[in-house]
Image (cartoon, rainbow, N blue to C red):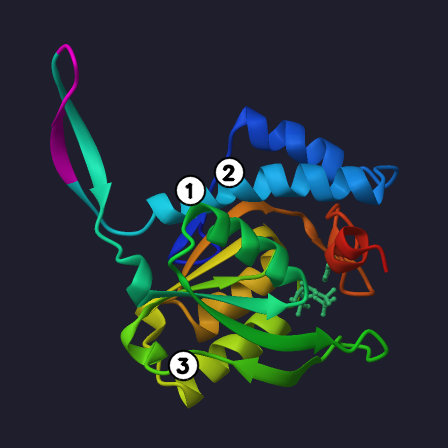
Amino acid sequence: MSSGLHPNLTLVQSKALRLLFTKLRDKNTSQVDFVQYSKRLMRLLVEDTLASLPTVEIERQTPTGLFKGLESTTIPSQTCVVSIMRSGDALLESFREVEPAFKVGKILIQRDEASADKTAQFFYEKLPPGIHEMNVILCDPMVATAGSAIAALDLLCQVKHVDPSQITFATIICAPEGLGVLARKYPEVKIVTAAIDESLNDEKFIVPGLGDFGDRFYGT
Ligand code: PRP
Ligand code: URA
């Protein structure tokens, strides 16, 4: 399913995701359960993100007949999964469980929770050489103001010369405000998300959201 909020947005929906989101969003869910349920949810998101990449129609002989199927044309060694640390690392590991041959890149960007607009601050990057020739899967579970996502995309596109059309951004929950910012600055970036929530509150947290993903996943 798509939405009018961004021209390249895929909203993945299923009953399985809704069940997992119910556990994940519950403020009384323990850290151990949050990790377990988010890993299950991220695995579904990973499969849908990989399925959104280019495919070709193929036929395969089954033991009893002919099956008309699909095959991915993505070459893992020419694909780089980039996490926006720290929360993006959780999603990155789900991609690596499915395809260990993916290259890995890391960008440390943190929201300044003391600032009124929650400015994203860049601290560190480690990206493979030749990333501009690769397909890039950017990972961050949460898009609120999109300040962190824009900082990561600016680094990839303006400094590392990755074409925005080569980038797929995988994320669990987006706020409409953040999607609007991404639509204005990076309409060519493909976004795959499992939820588009109502809005941001005064502290720029997603409503209903799930709170601070990193704090709940890592127990800080
Ligand atoms: C969270 C989240 C995103 C960012 C989203 O990270 O993982 O990176 O906030 O907010 P934004 O769209 O308003 O930028 P945070 O900076 O809290 O760091 P963490 O992953 O270490 O918890
Ligand atoms: N980061 C999070 O983890 N959650 C939000 O709601 C906003 C930013």
Reading the image, the residue beneath label 2 is 44
Q: Give the quarter of the image for residue 186.
A: bottom left
Identify the amino acid type marked 2. Answer: Leu
Is residue 25 visible in this depiction of the protein? Answer: no
Q: Judging from the image, what secondary structure is the residue with disc 1 in?
A: helix
Marker disc for residue 157 = 3
Q: Earlier in the sequence, mark 2 or mark 3?
A: 2
Marker disc for residue 48 = 1
Give the position of the C terminus as an image quadrant: bottom right
Judge by depth and name the residue closer to the eye, 117 or 23. Answer: 23
Judge by depth and name the residue closer to the eye, 1 or 79. Answer: 79
Few, some or many residues within 10 Å of mark 3 (<14, 14–19, 20+)? some
| Magenta highlight: main SS | strand
Residue at 84%, 55% (x, y): give it.
219
Of badges 2 and 3, the one in the foreground is 2
Q: In the image, 118: left or right of 84? A: right
Tags 1 and 3 in contact by the CB under 8 Å rule?
A: no
Identify the amino acid type marked 1. Answer: Asp
Q: How many marks?
A: 3
